[in-house]
Amino acid sequence: MIFAGIPVCALAVLVLVDSSEHILSEKYWPYIFYGIMMVVVVLGMLAYNVTPKRFILPLGIAGWIITSSILCWVGWFGPHGAFAHQP
């Protein structure tokens, strides 16, 4: 399951898309978000089947590192983060 870091990394990028809620209505954004999540997970399963086995571990570890970096950055410095810029 280490390869799950690749699809989860793609999902972490969705956290960075904070302005999409203003472009789309609040009513439809959760459905679009969960639809994108399902597509990314299915694509991750397909990518697992075609990726050479020697790349599974390095790609998975890199995916988890990037995921944790994105989520920590958003949590600390994002619009509602702990160290967010307050005008």
Image: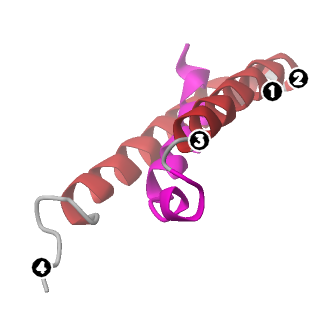
Which element is circle 3 on? loop
For image coordinates 46% across by 36% down, the residue present is: 64
Q: Secondary structure at mark 1?
A: helix
Q: Nearer the viewer, mark 1 or mark 3?
A: 3
Residue that label 1 marks: 47
| Figure disc tally | 4
Residue depicted at x 12% and y 79%: 86
Tell me the residue that label 2 is attached to.
50
Identify the residue position indicated by label 4 in the image.
86
The kind of residue tagged 1 is Ala
Q: Gap in Å between the C-alphas at discs 3 and 4?
A: 29 Å
Location of the N terminus by quadrant is: top right
2 and 4 marks in contact (CB < 8 Å): no
Given the current orientation, which residue lies at the most extreme top position? 1
Q: How packed is label 3: few (under 14 Cα within 10 Å), some, or many (20 or more)?
A: few
Residues marked 1 and 2 touching at CB (< 8 Å): yes
| Residue 37 % position (x, y) | 62, 31
For the residues marked 3 and 2, what is the alpha-carbon distance in whole angstroms?
Answer: 34 Å
Q: Residue at x 52, y 42 (%)?
A: 27
**In the rendered image, the vertical position of residue 75 relative to residue 55, given as above or below:** below
Label 1 environment density (alpha carbons within 10 Å; few <14, some 14–19, many ≥20): some
Check residue 6 for magenta coloring: yes
Quadrant hosting residue 20: bottom right
